[in-house]
Amino acid sequence: MKLRASNIAKLEQHDYDVLIIGGGINGAVAAAALSGKGARVALIDQRDFAGFTSQQSSNLAWGGIKYLESHDYGLVRDLCKSRNHLLEHYPSRIREIRFYSTLEKGFRFHPLFVYLGTWVYWLFGNGFTKVPNWLSRKRVEAEEPLIRTDRFYGGFEYSDAYLYDNDSRFVFQFIRAAMDRGCIAANYVESLGARKVGDRWLTRARDGMSGREFEIRAKVLINAAGPFVDAHNGLTGERTAHRHAFSKGIHLIVPQITPNNRILTFFADDGRLFFVIPMGMRTCIGTTDTRVESPYAEVTDEDRQFVLDNINKRLKLAKPLGRADIIAERCGVRPLVVKAGKDGQARDWLQMSRKHEIDANPANAHISIFGGKLTDCINVGNEVADLVAGMGVRLPFPNYTWYGEAPAAVREEYLHQARLMDLGRYTSPDAIEPLSSRLWRRYGQQALELLADIREDPRQAEVLIKGTDYIRCEIRLAKQQEMITTLEDFLRRRSKIALVVRHEDIRRAEGLMEACQILFGDEAQAKFDAYFQARN
């Protein structure tokens, strides 16, 4: 954990142009944009990066077709363009996928009307994806025989996009890019509040691991604390035009339901879109939409039963899914933006959008980011950079493109080296993709370092944690570059092991203790025990 200790020391040693509170998607892209453009940036999060809302999404980068029903045409247009931008700039991490949708008799619209909506959606996206198709009962029964068609009313398929890896890994890649460009970031550092003294914000911070308190100085303070934005504004006395309302959503991870790489889409009993999302040899099903008053939420028995009932009602499974089939659960809140002073009931709760709002106070050099979603993250980063520049912070490289995967020439060189050393022979028999593809997607140009490690010592290509596809040199790179502070950081966020492997199987996994020894050294046993004791 040398990287974290070094960065915490630097946080109190220097003055910064910008301090960002929060390492979820909004804070991550703000840090990546500002550091890439030349600002001196610091970032802290009281948990791990992407350790709260940003680790609980549906893993979709979509244009929000459901918002057509609420006539949010401008939002849909913007989100479709943002989705296209992500597909273009992250070809290995974000991929187009077909949404396979069926409607039941009694649905509130005729299926041809909804099908027409998919064409409007396609046009809003500039025809960037494959065209929509109509689905007859006969075609559905041939292509997805698991879908019940006894109450079939009509069907269609259209395209959107999804994150091939998990959402928190995608967020961390922005954090890592920011650090590569000079940002000083640290996880498990809590802001205790800030005050303005002269032209500087003085933020009192506490190291969550040691308990030590210290001060961070910055010209501009950005509150990107996700669902805790309002609470942190209360600590600084900042008044804003917007605030958050919260909606809880859950997903259940179960064994693979269908081998087809498409997302099955239904309308659940409450009228909300309901997804069956591929996750390799697993399937993610959900979601729910329940209004809650607190950012802290958990999966209830009622939530589980709602999801299981809806999936069993719409699919012809050999055996209905039950609670014993649940491998893992995801539960988080959607921070929905409402005007300050309003209760968020001005429109149908289920139709409220995830549109972001940024409240800027130039006189106080303070920015608050509300709402948002993974799809729109590039726009958030650019908007924040423009606002910071307007507050007098010099950005030496204002036109720098701070997002996207490494250039095609770097990828070709990586793939050429992988072919020369026959990297494919090291791919695990249980893997669902070639090792060369996975290393590039997860590490970008840093994958070249992994190739060098394997050439020097072929044992570095061995799967270290049995039952997963993580190889030895990946764990070593994670120790050096990914600020893994607890075992959960690795199992749940830098990887998705905790999402696809049962808890008891993780504990028994051969090689896990060796991975802990690489990551934590003398603290390996303590970190191992802390993780599993917290989940007993």
Image (spheres, helix red, strand yellow):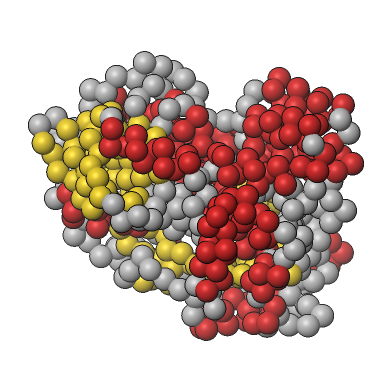
Q: Is residue 528 left or right of residue 33?
A: right
Front in this rendered view, residue 237 or 473: 473
Residue at figure coordinates x 38%, y 29% from the top left: 34
Image side of residue 406 versus residue 365, left or right: right
Measuring from the top left, give residue 481's x and y in whole percent: 55, 39
Residue 244 in the image: x percent, y percent? 30, 58
Residue at 14% x, 50% y: name it: 237
How many numbered discs, if any?
0
Which quarter of the picture shows residue 465? bottom right
Q: Is residue 356 visible?
A: no
Can residue 431 be seen at all in this image of the molecule?
yes
Q: Which residue lies furthest to the front in this view?
A: 522
Residue 128 point in image, percent of width and height: 64, 35
Q: Residue at x 36, y 65 (%)?
A: 295
Relative to 387, is 102 above or below? below
- Residue 516's place in the image compared with 368, above or below, is below
Front-most of residues 372 and 79: 372
| Residue farthest left in this picture | 198
The residue under the point 34% across, 38% down is 9
Of residue 354 and residue 47, the one placed in the foreground of this image is: 47
- Above or below, 405 relative to 287: above
Residue lying farthest to the top in this orientation: 396
Q: Which of 408 and 43 is in front in this view?
A: 43
In the image, 145: left or right of 186?
right
Q: Position of residue 325 (x, y in %)?
A: 70, 78
The C terminus lies in quadrant: bottom right
> In the displayed structure, does residue 149 sit left or right of residue 235?
right
